[in-house]
Image (cartoon, helix red, strand yellow):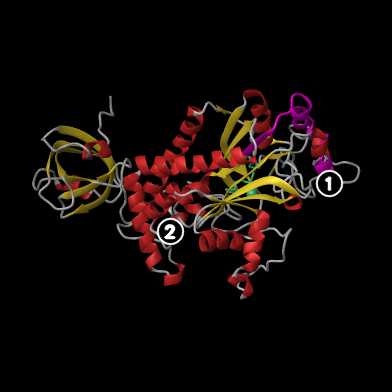
Amino acid sequence: MFNKRIKIKELLAQEPTGQEVTVMGWVRTFRNNQFIALNDGSTNNNLQVVAGLGKFDDELLKRITTSASLKVTGAIVPSLGKGQKMDMNATSIEILGDSDAEKYPLQPKKHSLEFLREIAHLRFRTNTFGSVFRVRHSLAFAIHKFFNDKGFVYMHTPIITASDAEGAGEMFRVTTLPFDEKNEKTPRNEDGSINFKEDFFGRATNLTVSGQLEGELGATAFGEIYTFGPTFRAENSNTARHLAEFWMIEPEMAFCDLEDNANLAEEFIKYLIQYAMNNNREDLEFLAQRLSDEEKQLPQDKRSEMGLMEKLEFVLTNNFERLTYTEAIDILKESNHNKKKKFQYEITGWGMDLQSEHERFLVEKHFKKPVILTNYPAAIKSFYMRLNEDGKTVAAMDILAPGIGEIVGGSQREERLDKLEDRMKEMNIPAEELWWYMDTRRFGTVPHAGFGLGFERMVQFVTGMTNIRDVIAFPRTPKSAEF
Ligand code: 4AD
Ligand code: MG
């Protein structure tokens, strides 16, 4: 058996008593032809391996270069140096893989996040990305634990669909047709449009923008389900909070109204934060320090008022502010910010869609905590949201988080068939194609609700990373699909 190693994280938690162990990992640095900082990805903390002078031949020592991979066996003893409690006195060093230090793009110095994005295939080997992706893993695990403990059924909704769940037309086409304007082989209708009947699925299909519609089918059978999978949006938004491929968690609950929905979402977000604080403290403290260093470059008024740990603690211990869209518009209208014409997009009044600068004002300047905005005008929200008594707003909710903006979008669903049909007609959503969705309203319809949490935005919030491209392994954004 090859792998009889101990992970460095586990080893560092032990007391150094001379125990003999084997570790494997990648060289971070090699000093004085003697001290190897070895990292195996289990923690940012390296094991200091001591290659005693005269014990190893020069040929071998020359091959101990940055990022070479090693298998090392030795005794664990108290460290004589400062900064670590133990050393490994190596008795055997085996080079598993050489690394040409001249060509290796990561040098033992600080690299910019922009540069690291260009070498995203290697950036996991840095402390920052080690921490970010261990936290991301933890949050993914916590999501399943949260819902499993509550008896929700994890539902795998399709990635290829024929419907547009959000009705926003931001879809990536999926096709096997020979596809270009002039191609004579492309099957066409008489009017020249593409004949998708000839396509693989016999109809036009796309990558899913949301698993919600199928999730509603699940909820109206199991009672409570959640999805957790990749979703795709062909929106041409080049911002620090948009991806073309992102992961979304979508719980859907039968017998549930907007308030129940908001309660669950708040509990869920707090649970995830608490989970990371309990299980990833070391990585979060590293990321908190990183963020504070990054912010030192900014002018005073652009810096956060709280450090990362403080912010997470604060969110845990305070209720989210809840208010209606109508109240939010009043606050924005009356704000000094608006009166001094500091918004780029003017507050035109009730009915307008909120821009992210407006959301951020509410969260970061006005309330200084997460906000749940409810009951938006029907005209600016999706077709499936439940019409309120007033006939002009819907039972929608968005959760806005400091530094992020919208982190959750959800609603109580329109469970009344006639009202749903009216709304779909108004918004030009083809009800015939969604016959299967409408069936849930025909056969034992129930009040139900759900929401979608953008996973990467949640990871951003917990890790304090300012660009969404740095919390997903291989970001897909307009004009960029490397790796
Ligand atoms: O508000 P959205 O579009 O809602 C839905 O998709 C509903 N079907 C959810 C539901 O009720 N089941 O998206 C939900 C969340 C947003 O609040 C945001 O956090 C995230 O998904 N999101 C994105 N994250 C990264 N990049 C993008 N382009 C995103 N678009 C939405
Ligand atoms: Mg939304």
Q: Which secondary structure, mark 1?
A: helix
Magenta span: 422-450
Q: Answer with the quarter of the image where residue 280 lies.
A: top left
At numbered mark 2, what does the secondary structure look like: helix, strand or loop? Answer: helix
Quadrant showing the N terminus: top left
Q: Residues within 10 Å of mark 2 (few under 14, many from 20)?
A: some
Residue at x 13% of width, y 33% of height: 19
- Magenta-colored stretch includes residue 423: yes
Task: Tell me if residue 259 comes above or below residue 254 in the rendering.
Answer: below
Judged left or right of residue 416, residue 231 is left
Q: Which residue is mark 2?
A: 113
Location of mark 1 (residue):
426
Locate residue 465 relative to residue 48 in the image: left or right. Answer: right
Foreground: disc 2 or disc 1: 1
Inspect the image, locate mark 2, and give the three-letter code of the amino acid beneath it. Answer: Leu
Outermost residue on the right side: it is 190
Residue 305 at what x, y percent from top left? 42, 63
Kindly tell me whether residue 126 is visible in this rendering.
Answer: no
Question: How many angstroms separate mark 2 from mark 1 (CA)?
Answer: 46 Å
| Residue projecting furthest to the bottom | 340
User: Amino acid type of disc 1?
Assistant: Glu
